[in-house]
Amino acid sequence: MQFLLAFIVVGPLIGAAAALLPAPPGLKGKSPDQAVLRHGVTVTGVILAAAIVLALGFDHDQPSKMQATTDISWIPALDVRIHLGTDGISLPLLVLTALLTFLCALYSYFKMPEGPSPKAFVALLLLLECGTLATFAVLDLLLFFLAFETVLIPMYFLIARWGGADRRPAAWKFILYTLLGSVVMLLGLLLVGLQAGTFDMLALATDNGRGLSLSVQVVAVLAIGIGLAVKTPMWPLHSWLPDAHTSAPTVGSVLLAGVLLKMGTYGFVRIVLPIAPDGMQVFAPYLAAFAVVGVIYGSLACLALARPGSKGDLKRLIAYSSVGHMGFVLLGIATMTPTGVNGALFANIAHGLITGLLFFLAGAVKDRYGTADLDTLAGATGAALYGRAPRLGGLLAFAAVASLGLPGLAGFWGEMLALFGAFDPAEGLSRPAFLTFMAIGGLGTLLTAAYLLVVVRRVCMGGPRPAGEARLADVQGYEFAAWTPLVALTVLAGLWPAVLLGLTDPAVQKLLSGGKA
């Protein structure tokens, strides 16, 4: 199993290097471009299969135990080690990353975004997968930082080279925000490692902050938290996200929302909570306050974009919805309780599935209409997807009601548990303050339902198709193949949440108790 996890992390990097080489004559197919796109599907498919085998071979009776570990000395002078492993917290994120990357590669094989040669596109996609998988698998603070930074360059080029209008300013905004946040985060990681005498995340979590003074913990949480908050994205450090999503190609938006945003919240759970608990307790009320402001702000921004005459962009609206949804994740983490943190981890996975599907659908609508502008889509009678492309309209409505947290679908459980966690926060946190945050978050769920229902009404409903107007192409075979797993998992997680919570809860209990199972 340890070799399997190492292969999952390193395999995409080898595949990225191979994508840049000339295709063997017998494997070119119709063209070299087709060959390299097929290579991307093959490599991501193999990684997904390996991730599924890893999940099946995982000891589900001991999800709190770090499994499939590799521990090799790398830089002895700093005691930096190539330390890999997975538990009930990271395993779902590894599988989600492998799944979404494979679906993006499959989608791109049939619908390659306009831009330069597919060679660079496939290589960047695989490099992005490598960095994301490594972030969820490494157990050394400096390796975590390196993996965290690895994803920036490929995502920058995916936006700048294959994006839409204003792609270069959006790409620059993305990389400048995240790089500046990462510099501050590195200082915090170095402070923790040097003060504790080790960069090993397991040893630091077991120590549970006992080797760090309160002042060191406070400074470390502030520095590390800023870098993680930018990537999450937390209000008011979110302003790079709408531009990046609006300009990114469809698969870039899917991966950015589906897995890259999760790297920030994962860092809070894996590093900040167990390593500096006293410092986290100081900042928890402020983190919760920023989180619920983000929930309300994101919802109000979406309502403004959905309003007739506002020239709102569908992809931009979904991007702002992510600010609100990730606010619930941060609220759950800020409660510092097993209920809240489990809710945050569940909401992470649910958001990856549902928002990934929403961006796929928004890209499909834009391909068919030539625009994602809501006023243009609505027109005089509405885009009327129910009548012109009923399967596409039905899927968009399904993704919208899943995103608003309809009971029985994945979006419900994470937000509900985060609010439950705020109802009874950890000892030492102000219960009246968190009850206020819970009430504000509850208001955010109502606003979320409002803007998503407005979007469905404007895009899916409308008058009959005008005489002589061509019928829109409905869901194609390759789209069906790329979207069906997301729909199925959204329903499965909603109806059977124990599948995920059974993995995360024992690991969270151990994490919050200082390494005691």
Image: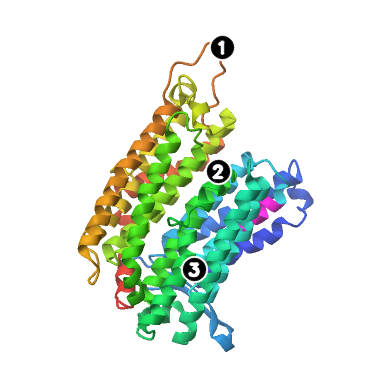
Residue type for callout 2 = Thr
Which residues make up the magenta segment?
120-127
Residue type for callout 1 = Gly
Mark 1 and mark 2 residues within 8 Å of each other at the beta carbon: no
Residue type for callout 3 = Ala
Q: Is residue 252 left or right of residue 28?
A: left
The circle drawn on residue 468 is 1
Locate the C terminus by quadrant: bottom left
Residue 462 in the image, given as x and y percentages of width and height: 43, 21
Q: How many marks?
A: 3
Q: Is residue 502 visible?
A: no
Mark 3 and mark 2 residues within 8 Å of each other at the beta carbon: no
- Magenta-drawn stretch, dominant element (helix, strand or loop): helix
* Rendered view: 262 above or below 427: above
Q: Earlier in the sequence, mark 1 or mark 3?
A: 3
Residue 398 in the image, given as x and y percentages of width and height: 39, 36
Element under disc 2: helix
Q: Is residue 451 visible?
A: yes
Mark 1 or mark 2: which is in front? 2
Element under disc 1: loop
Please tell me whether residue 122 belongs to the stretch shown in magenta. Answer: yes
Q: Residues within 10 Å of mark 3 (few under 14, many from 20)?
A: many
Residue 153 in the image, given as x and y percentages of width and height: 63, 59
The residue beneath circle 2 is 246
The residue beneath circle 3 is 137
Indicate the quadrant where residue 47 lies: bottom right
- Give me the C-alpha separation between circle 3 and circle 2: 30 Å
Indicate the quadrant where residue 262 lies: bottom left
